[in-house]
Amino acid sequence: MSEANEEHVATRPEDVAMAAYAGGDDRALGIVYDALGGRLFAFLTRRARDRELAEDLLQQTFLQIHRNRSSFSAGAAVAPWAFAIARRLLIDAMRAKTRLRKNFGDRDEDAMDRLAGASNPELAAGARQETAQLFAKLEALPEAQRVAFELIRIDGLSMAEAAEMLGTTVTAMKLRAHRAYKALGLAGESGVDR
């Protein structure tokens, strides 16, 4: 990670708050929760396809964050760590249901609205149709490309955060994302092909 990225990471409120929480400031967890709770819940809901399970997994994620707070490195980014915890818990939950689901993509209404940016009801119908087509194409992508797209475009993680969460390099994540954007006809919007 470059020095510029390390400086940027260390100044995010949730990262600073997590470092404070790891150091014993119990009030700082609220800042971490406010910054990541919604993103983690959307991530879990979309993949679990079960709102109640996602709520349980979100609670378990923050319980794991609490239990392991002493292992958090000050100056590190909390988002990839939290998403990795949530992802591991999700995998465990799916295995407990007998099988791991192969397709983590979903066509939930919130994700479609976010991708379509459909705030105007009159534009929503057309945007929803385009978004449904995008999700159909997304489901046809190889899992590595699909997950890269979802983490970056839908969940809002940076390339570095997504790479850290998946245990790969930023370069590999950029390549996966670029291939996904290209396959989806969004190559000019990726920011990774420049």
Image: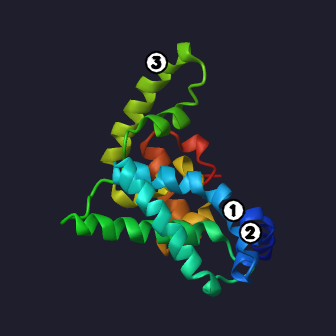
> What's the distance in space between the residues labelled 3 and 2, CA to CA?
43 Å
Horizontally, is 70 left or right of 135 in the view? right
Q: What is the x, y in percent for residue 193?
A: 60, 52
Pointer 3 or 2: first along the chain: 2
> What's the distance in space between the residues labelled 2 and 1, CA to CA?
6 Å
Q: Is residue 86 above or below residue 34?
A: below
Can you name the residue that lies furthest to the front here? 26
Which label belongs to residue 125?
A: 3
Q: Is residue 101 above or below residue 121?
A: below
Q: How is the image coloured?
A: rainbow
Q: Is residue 77 visible?
A: yes
Q: What is the x, y in percent for residue 162?
A: 55, 64
Q: Which residue is mark 2?
A: 27
Q: Is residue 185 visible?
A: no
Q: Amino acid at mark 3?
A: Ala
Q: Amino acid at mark 2?
A: Arg
Residue at figure coordinates x 39%, y 31% from the top left = 132
Q: Is residue 188 above or below residue 20?
A: above
Q: Amino acid at mark 1?
A: Gly
Can you name the residue that lies furthest to the left here? 98
Please state which of residues 161 and 13 is positioned toward the viewer in this rendering.
13
